[in-house]
Image (spheres, rainbow, N blue to C red):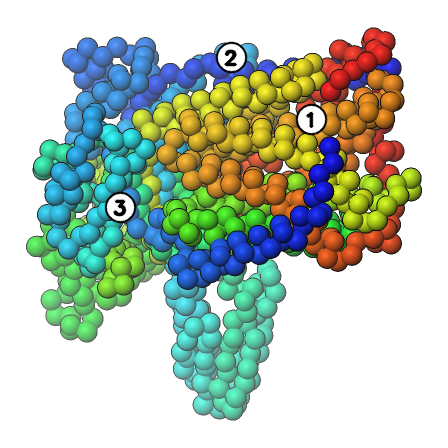
Amino acid sequence: MNQFRIWQYLLIFSTILIGIIYAIPNFFPSKPALQIALGGSTANERVIIEVSEVLDRNNINYSEILLQENSVKVVLDNVEDQLASRRLIADYSDGDYIIALNSEPTTPDWLRNIGGNPLNLGLDLAGGIHFLLEVDTQRYSIERISSESASIEDELKRQGLAVTSSAVGSEAYFSFTNSADLEAAKEYLNDNNFTISGNKFNILQNGLDLTLVYTDSFLSEIIDYAVEQNLVALRNRVNELGVSEPIVQREGKGRIVVELPGVQDSASAKKIIGKTANLEFRLEARNSDSFLRKEKFSYKDNPVATAFLEKKTILTGDSVTNAQSSFDENGRPQVNISLDIDGGRAMQNATTGNIGRRLGVVLVEEKTKTFFDVNNEVRQETFIEKNIISNATIQAVLGTSFRITGLGSSTESSELALLLRAGALAAPMKFVEEQTIGPTLGQENIDKGVDSIIIGFCLVFLFMILRYRLFGLSANIALICNLILVTSIMSVFGATLTLPGIAGIVLTVGMAVDANVLIFARISEELKNNIDVQSAIKNGFAKAFSTIMDANITTLIVALILYAIGTGPIKGFAVTLSIGIITSIFTAILVTRSFVNMIYGYRDIRELKV
Amino acid sequence: MNIPFTKFNNLGLAISGLLLILSIAFISLRGLNFGLDFTGGISIEINYDGKVELEDIRTSLSSIEDANFVVLNFGSDDNILIKFQSEDVESFSPQTVFDQLEVDNLLGEVTKTEVIFPQIGEELRDNGGIAILVAIFAILVYIIFRFQYKFGIGAIAALVHDVLLILGLFSIFQLTFDLSVLAAVLAIVGYSLNDSIVVSDRIRENFLDQNQKGSSDSLINKSLNQVFARTIITSFTTLLVLMALLIAGGAALTNFSLALAVGVIIGSYSSIFIVVGVLLKMNLSNKDMEKPKNDPEESYSMN
């Protein structure tokens, strides 16, 4: 007799039950919402009042409006209202607010308490903006090596050695005038040739010259550092946007993906994220300074106005640890700046004896120009633009913490604070991919996906029932269980569902029945050999097992390779395909078996047709 | 059922050979019509409340200097797709298009904009190729470990055959080859293997069965007949769901579904003719079989 033990049934059914529970949150429709952030300063009660006034004036109903972290969230009744109010609030704020279309899950508390959440929807389903930025790692490592060699030269000179240095690519050259100096330098270099991953450089000697060849491990270490640093800076900038559930993650060696679900206004998002900027603090040049020592810059907000600053940079944006806009004693806007210790020391040295002079803050932006060349291929050229964002008089010797006063408006001060805060990038970056997906397209994609799953399911269902009758019914139940398990596993692990992901699920539906078809074909073969029904069922399952495993494991290998190598849509497809393969092995074998057992296992059957 | 598959084997190989030569010729001479994902460029999708005249859009956009746009309907006639191909050497952004359409009162709802730079595309293409090669290698190792090297070569031959024919098809008809099609091709790699493994598994089983008498040829033919019904049914159900994707999945998934559907058919065909063809040409015999360590009949016991 084909019977499972009670605990076996229990195990199988409780697995499915757990699957159902964690799939449930997807059936509570989420409510359309708007998220309003101020891009820099925190939202407050005033914004709530203003927004609710705008909505009331236009007779738009909203079920909730509340402060959430540093933004305001408005929950609306339907998508039309959501889109209408987005437009109204955008018009009202005239670009000051960053508005994201959002949805508020209506998952009941008890489900949420046990970790039940609806599926994360990818940008192609939720709408939003996707950016891919590339860190210029090559340029960064060249700059880094040249500053390394310069600081080694400084140190050697400090030790009283006569040395000159230069750097090209990943090599640094040092020339000495006598061998005593050279030996002393070698000793110093050998003592300082360590990093976490081993040697920093290999030293080659040629007469009175030394060449430092920086190791690949050191180069990849500094590149890693730069990319991680940029990632942190980008996260900060994205957080300034106040969008919920943004994604900022590294992709490959030197790329960073930024995804902003629900955001539609690519220009204002780019304005903040795309500030591939750094800052330089420089003293304003004296009139008597020679032109070799000073440089002319335009002001950022007024390109006609210019000022001369010294060529020497006191410190760069990396040293800024925080910047906040606030108001001074007289109620005028100001920006409070904090520096790290080294920055504070440099600032102190530079400002001592220079009270009364001006200190300029220069914003260094890398801008990209895109065009098609004569061969009709897209080309990009980058250029650097430097502008003064602040040029204020030094009132006292400055240290790690000081403020800039005398700013025109609170908008100006909060913008300056944002620039100061987020301005520090370790290495230059540029946009290499940009995608904006509208809200209706997202909804359309969801509808299409759901439709295809339903149609695909129905067709397969019908066919299986017609072809295999009760066995087909068991296979169909297994198929439903499979879909439930895929949904719940993806929901629990927070995997993101995309349109290619849905295609992956649909494909799994088609392929999952394969295991059942294999089993049923085997059973029917066994029956032809005049074996009794129960043994035929048993043998059918047993003989198909290794084939099913082999076939699924090889497909799984392919799916995992897809996941490892692919990006974006391919990854999404690979995720659902892998999960689908694993769950389908479980459902096609065990779930089908338990239903077949329940149907046939407790009866004495003489004849069976498959 | 007893179809003399192996009799038609040389015919099958000949047809495949011809198709392969055709595909390779087209791929190398004409190349693939790579989508924006791979070439880089700008694309904009706009939705209107009703039918829109493409000619109006073209006229409006032609006033943007030096820019050369491709304007097409996408999915339905109230959806348009604007692709940017220009010898313009000034910096350009989708905003220019929006502004121009706005001026001419032709701006609908922008549903999607994409700006992709060429180096990304090149990398994607390379990664796709690498993914296929790594997959082939990993599978080869697995099959040699689980079966025998001749099966491995058979499965890989079928896989390369399937992938080349799909690429050939996309080259011949100049269908847009984008990221989703690449995903489909990789899925076909999985599907084709699935089929090859099922066939190989059966052949191995029959060769190992001491009670089975007959030549390699007849044993292989018997195996093919045994799995034939399953091959047809599985391909059929997979085609059913792909039909659903084609019907309801929208324009974004059309080429994906198409590539997969053709791949499923070719995959089933190749599991019968290519895998078996290779096995026959390599004179697969009982001697090639060693009993696997895990007897499949013993490895699963639950009752």
Dot 2 alpha-carbon crowd within 10 angstroms: few under 14, some 14 to 19, many 20 or more: few
Secondary structure under the numbered disc 1 in the rendered image: helix
Q: Nearer the viewer, residue A276 or A469?
A: A469
Question: Is residue A376 visible in the rendered structure shown here?
Answer: yes
Residue A591: which quarter of the image? top right
Residue tagged by mark 2? A109
Dot 1 alpha-carbon crowd within 10 angstroms: few under 14, some 14 to 19, many 20 or more: many
**Tag count in the figure?**
3
Residue B83 is tagged as 3
Residue tagged by mark 1? A516
Dot 3 alpha-carbon crowd within 10 angstroms: few under 14, some 14 to 19, many 20 or more: some
Residue at image position (51%, 12%) is: A109
Q: Are marks 1 and 2 in contact (CB under 8 Å)?
A: no
| Residue B285 image offset from top left, x and y in percent | 83, 53
Using the image, determine if residue B127 lies above or below residue A91.
below
| Residue A496 image offset from top left, x and y in percent | 49, 32
Question: Which quadrant of the rendered structure holds the N terminus of chain A?
Answer: top right
Q: What amino acid is labelled 2 in the image? A: Asp
- The answer for how far apart the CA atoms under marks 3 and 1 are is 46 Å
Q: What amino acid is labelled 1 in the image? A: Asn
